[in-house]
């Protein structure tokens, strides 16, 4: 799999293989943050890799783009 988060998998999966569990007690923004942080920590997402645009990832995950924007801000501040 590519390290470029903007690359679609062609299998109907969101960019980067991210997934949210809507029935979880964990907020969606936290789920997305944890998944991206894991990809960074594990080396799957390399420094300089482009993240999917806010609107694109929001649409793919069916979440508000402001949620994605907040996750990206949290990652930048980490």
Image: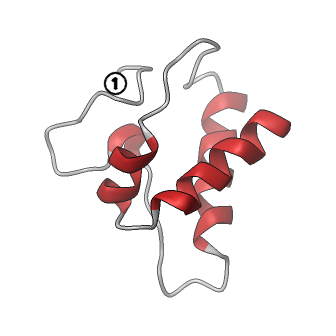
**Residue at position x 57%, y 62% from top?**
67
Q: Is residue 6 above or below residue 70?
A: above
**Residue at position x 76%, y 47% from top?**
74
Q: Is residue 8 above or below residue 24?
A: above
Q: Is 69 or 19 nearer to us in this picture?
A: 69
Image quadrant containing the N terminus:
top left
Q: Position of residue 57 (x, y in %)?
A: 39, 48
Left or right side of 70 for 3: left
Q: Is residue 67 above or below residue 36?
A: below
Which secondary structure, mark 1? loop
Q: Is 11 or 58 nearer to us in this picture?
A: 58
Classify mark 1: residues with Cα within 10 Å, few (<14), some (14-19) or many (20+).
few
Left or right side of 32 for 53: left
**Residue at position x 26%, y 50% from top?**
13
Q: Is 1 or 28 nearer to us in this picture?
A: 28
- Extreme residue toward the right, this view: 78
Question: In the rendered image, which quarter is residue 15 located in?
Answer: top left
The colour style of the image is secondary structure
Left or right side of 51 for 39: right
Q: Position of residue 12 (x, y in %)?
A: 17, 51
Q: Is residue 40 above or below residue 64?
A: above
Q: Position of residue 56 (x, y in %)?
A: 33, 46
| Disc 1: which residue | 1
Question: In the rendered image, which quarter is residue 26 located in?
Answer: bottom right
Image quadrant containing the C terminus:
top right
**Residue at position x 43%, y 59% from top?**
19
């Amino acid at each position: 799999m590519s390290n470029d988060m903007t690359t679609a998998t062609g299998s109907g999966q969101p960019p980067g293989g991210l997934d949210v569990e809507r029935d979880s007690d964990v907020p969606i923004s936290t789920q997305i943050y944890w998944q991206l942080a894991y990809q960074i920590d594990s080396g799957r997402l390399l420094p300089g890799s482009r993240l999917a645009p806010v609107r694109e990832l929001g649409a793919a995950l069916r979440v508000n783009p402001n949620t994605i924007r907040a996750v990206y801000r949290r990652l930048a501040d980490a």
